[in-house]
Image: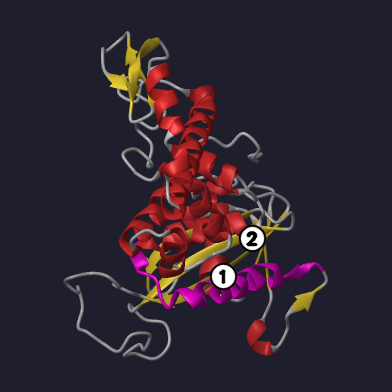
Amino acid sequence: MRSADFELFVSRIASLSKKQRGKLLDLLQQSTRQEQMIARIEAAAATCLCCPACRSTRYHKHGRADGLQRYRCIACGKTFNALSGTPLARLRHRAKWLDFTQSMLDSRSVRRAAADLGIHKNTSFRWRHRFLTLTRTDRPQCLHGIAEADEMYLLESEKGSRRLQRAPRKRGVASKRGISGEQVCILVARDRTGQTLHFLTGKGALTACQLQDNLLPVIDRDILLVTDGHAAYRSFARAAGISHQAVNLRAGVRVKGAVHVQNVNAYHARFRQWLAPFHGVASRYLNNYLGWRWVLDARRIVSPEAMLNAAIGVFPHLTRT
């Protein structure tokens, strides 16, 4: 805006009504938050910025688009910005992203977050899973020392699906008793330092083959694996050649010295309690919710800014083991 036009604009502010001044202030605050958000995004992405098409780090500035600095890759000629190739690409209302990440740290429901931020509930749902796409990938690489492992089961849910892949039933009520193909198995392994890994092994009871595929790559060979009396753990430990101790929960034996599964069972309880207010989640999104809960339980991310950084794949303050 030219100086003369700006002076004219300022001279007319006094003639605005109270409602008009309030609207102008809201617009100015929103614009300021938008600029601050863009600066924060570009500062976070600068540490690992590269062309999402060819991964080249040779690029030059090429104007701006939607407020973000645009770059052109010297190697392949394609343009990109700090959000290109991330789950947050093409999402709108950036000024509200920090407020939304705070709602995730507070574990608010989709509708509660939408009402607080003044966005549609479908937008709130879409943002939730976009922000969790990369956040859930920050997890321990290996478990050490004494590690507890135990499985938990959740009833399979096709919540939100237009076409069910099974016969309809009353929500939350299984048609069969006990563990069956209607239950989704979640294997949780946790060492005594609090490092936790989770795996969706499929429907029905846990098997030794599933343990071989999921658990073996992420544990030390000199680890002591502590479990309940499930036969699959014994078979897995024998085949893998690792130390194994079991507690007979059915016989009422919960602790034998340092041998117990109370840490992992407590984690199960916290996860179920945290998940309950969401009134059931679709099984296809369970990995996102497990990752979300791990972030909160381990206090890996404690600020909206850190959650935003994690959503674009930047984990500057997180120590991987």
Q: Are marks 2 and 1 in contact (CB under 8 Å)?
A: yes
Query: In the rendered structure, which amino acid carries the disc numbered 2?
Result: Asp
- Report x, y in % for residue 313: 48, 37
Q: Which residue occupies the foreground of this view, 212 or 54?
A: 54
- Mark 2 crowdedness (10 Å alpha carbons): few <14, some 14-19, many ≥20: some
Colour scheme shown: secondary structure
- Report x, y in % for residue 245: 69, 67
Q: Which residue is at 56% across, 48% downward?
A: 218
What's drawn in magenta, residue-wise? Answer: 258-284
Q: Which residue is mark 2?
A: 297
Against 295, is 110 above or below?
Answer: below
Q: Which residue is at 34% across, 38% downward?
A: 89
Against 186, is 218 above or below?
Answer: above
- Residue 244 is tagged as none
Quadrant where the N terminus lies?
top left
Q: Which residue is mark 1?
A: 271
Asked if the magenta segment contains residue 304, the reply would be: no
- Mark 1 crowdedness (10 Å alpha carbons): few <14, some 14-19, many ≥20: some
Residue 50 sits in which quadrant?
Answer: top left
SS of the residue under disc 1: helix
Q: CA distance from mark 2 to mark 1?
A: 9 Å
Query: In the rendered structure, which amino acid carries the disc numbered 1?
Result: Phe
Residue 257 sits in which quadrant?
Answer: bottom right
- Report x, y in % for residue 278: 45, 73
Q: Which residue occupies the foreground of this view, 265 or 173?
A: 173
Position of 161 with respect to 230 (left or right) is left
Against 98, is 267 above or below?
Answer: below
- Report x, y in % for residue 68: 39, 27
